[in-house]
Amino acid sequence: MVKFDIRDLSVWFGPIPAIINLTMEIYANEILTIIGPSNSGKTTFLRMLNRLNDLEAQFKMQGRVAFDEKDVTTLDAQMLRKKVGMVFALPLPLPLSIFDNIAYGARMHGIRNKARLQEIVESSLREAYLWEEVKDRLNISAFKLSGGQQQRLCIARTLAVEPEVILFDEPCSGLDPISTAKIEEAILKLKQHYTLILVTNNVKQAARVGDRTAFFLSGGLIELDKTEKIFTIPSDKRTDDYISGKFG
C-alpha cells in the first residue's frame, strides 16, 4: 500500500532550489532510510511530508505530495501533523515532567480521563523502549534524563497522539552507541504499526534498519531500492562513491 505518492516535486526557498523534480513512493509499514551529503535536500523532503516547510519564508513548490491519495496541500496542516509526526535531531522535551511531556498531546486533543492518560503514557513509553528506565520517576523533570533518554521521550511523545507515520531527522546525531542502538531497536519494532522515514548521515545506520534506502544528491533522487541492493550493488556510481566514503 502506498502511503505517500510524490510526483514531480520541486522546492525553492527564494531563488535557491532545494529539491529538483523528485518522484517516488513510500509504502505503509516500511522503514525508508534517506542518505546523502549535506545540502542534498533530505531534510527539506522530510518536512514536505507534513508541511513544515510552509512555515519557512519564501517557500515555493511545484508538483504533488499525496498522503493516502490526498494532496497534502488540501489537508488541514495541524491534523496532517498529528498523523505524520516528526522527531528532530536534537531532543526537545517540554519543561514539564516525564508524564506531562507524554500526556501533553493527548490533552491537547481533548483527553482528560486520568486512567486513559496513564494508559497512553505507559504504552507510548513502552513502544519507545523507555518505560523500564523511567516508570518509577514519571514526575521528575524531563530535563533530568540523559540525551538518549530525552530523544526516546520525544519519540514517545510523538507516539502518544497516535500517528500513522513518523519522520526522523537524524535522531541519533550526537548520541553514544548504546543510546543509538536503543533508538534503532525501537524503530525496528515500530515498523509493525507505523510507516517510518529516517534521514541519517550514518550510512551504517541506514544499512542496519532500512527496508529501502534513497540516495539524494544536490536536491535530486539518484537511486531508490532495497537497502541490501543499495549497499551491495548500487545502480549508480555516485551512490557507490558516497557509501564508500569517496565524497560527502
Image (spheres, rainbow, N blue to C red):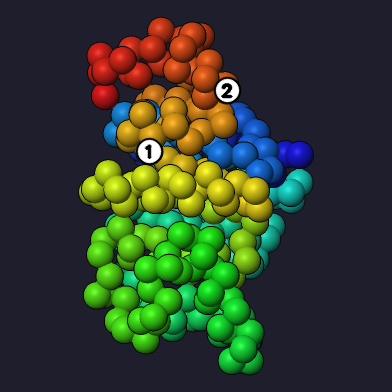
Q: Residues within 10 Å of mark 2 (few under 14, many from 20)?
A: some
- State how far apart marks 2 and 1 are (Cα): 16 Å
Residue 26 occupies quadrant:
top right
Which quadrant of the figure contains the N terminus? top right
Left or right? Give the position of 170 relative to 163: left
Query: Mark on residue 226?
Result: 2
* Local SS, label 1: loop
Of label 2 and label 1, which has the lower sequence position? Answer: 1
Residue count near mark 1 (Cα–Cα under 10 Å), binned few <14, some 14–19, many ≥20 = many
Residue 25, x across and y down, in percent: 65, 33
Residue 109 on image: x %, y %: 61, 81
**Image position of 21 with respect to 126: above or below:** above
The numbered disc on residue 238 is: none
Residue at the spot x=37%, y=45% of the render? 181
Q: Residue at point 36% right, 60% down?
A: 151
Q: Amino acid at mark 1?
A: Thr
Quarter of the figure with the C terminus: top left
What residue sits 62% from the left and 30% below the top?
A: 24
Residue 200 is labelled as 1
Q: Position of residue 46 (x, y in %)?
A: 48, 45
| Residue 222 vs residue 164, the one in the foreground | 164
User: In this picture, is 134 found above or below 172?
Assistant: below
Q: Is residue 225 above or below residue 8?
A: above
